[in-house]
Image: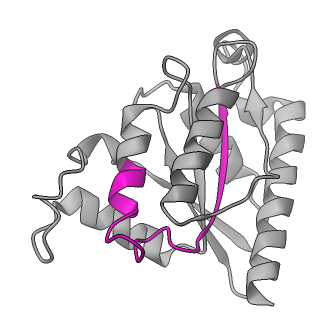
């Protein structure tokens, strides 16, 4: 069986981000047949502008993101919640991946959304907004994949998510859902 490549986009640009830590925990807990790649340059991608999106002239960071998404079997968005919604860096990545309209790198691509936030609901509003945006962009949104960790700043102040047994167990559920989506897609 070939490896399943999961391109992971982290919406927080902060070095000590709990969402980056969650992505690292996901990467560390990936089954042997899954290769989780954390794309690290969302902050280098210019805001989407159709004037910049010219074949052969697409900014290097945006072109690299598109290439990584095209090469991936599935996409995993890991998002914090900024003012009740998805952060600009992640929304911008979705915008670049949605083009060209109807044939972007997200078209038909199984995509899941997870995350953590300081608030009591773990960023579910941002996750819902991200699911909506990638769905409109053409992705096959995996609605059943749910992982929202509340109180992240306190919960992960002294413990990395990879060492949180409850989070690790939920990560296994994410991989089960991703595997089921890949199996369904192959059928």
The N terminus lies in which quarter of the figure?
Answer: bottom right
Residue occupying the point 52% across, 26% down: 17
| Lateral position of residue 45 relative to residue 91, left or right | left
Is residue 29 shown above or below 101? above
- Where does the image place residue 133, in percent across and percent down from the top left? 51, 49
Residue occupying the point 46% across, 68% down: 69
- Where does the image place residue 34, in percent across and percent down from the top left? 70, 69
Is residue 172 shown above or below 146? below
Residue occupying the point 53% across, 27% down: 85
Question: Can I make out residue 160 in this image?
Answer: yes
- Which span of residues is magenta-colored? 93-116
Question: Can I make out residue 8 in this image?
Answer: no
Q: Report the front residue among 5 and 63.
A: 63
- Where does the image place residue 123, in percent across and percent down from the top left? 65, 26
The C terminus lies in which quarter of the figure?
Answer: bottom right
Q: Where on the picture, by quarter, is residue 118?
A: top right
As for residue 19 lying within the magenta part, the answer is: no
Is residue 88 shown above or below 108? above
Residue occupying the point 75% across, 27% down: 149
Q: Report the front residue among 110 and 25.
A: 110
């Amino acid at each position: 069986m070939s490896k399943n490549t999961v391109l992971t986009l982290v919406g927080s640009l902060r070095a000590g981000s709990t969402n980056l830590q969650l992505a690292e925990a996901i990467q560390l807990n990936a089954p042997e047949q899954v290769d989780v790649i954390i794309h690290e340059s969302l902050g280098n991608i210019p805001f989407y502008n159709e004037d910049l999106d010219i074949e052969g002239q697409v900014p290097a960071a945006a072109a690299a993101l598109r290439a990584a998404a095209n090469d991936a079997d599935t996409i995993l968005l890991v998002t914090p919640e900024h003012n009740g919604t998805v952060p600009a860096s992640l929304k911008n990545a979705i915008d670049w991946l949605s083009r060209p309209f109807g044939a972007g790198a997200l078209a038909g691509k199984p995509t899941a959304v997870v995350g953590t936030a300081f608030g009591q609901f773990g960023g579910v509003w941002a996750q819902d907004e991200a699911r909506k945006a990638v769905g409109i962009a053409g992705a096959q949104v995996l609605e059943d994949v749910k992982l929202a960790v509340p109180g992240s700043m306190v919960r992960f102040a002294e413990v990395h998510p990879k060492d949180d047994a409850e989070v690790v167990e939920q990560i296994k559920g994410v991989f089960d859902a991703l595997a089921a989506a890949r199996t369904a897609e192959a059928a």
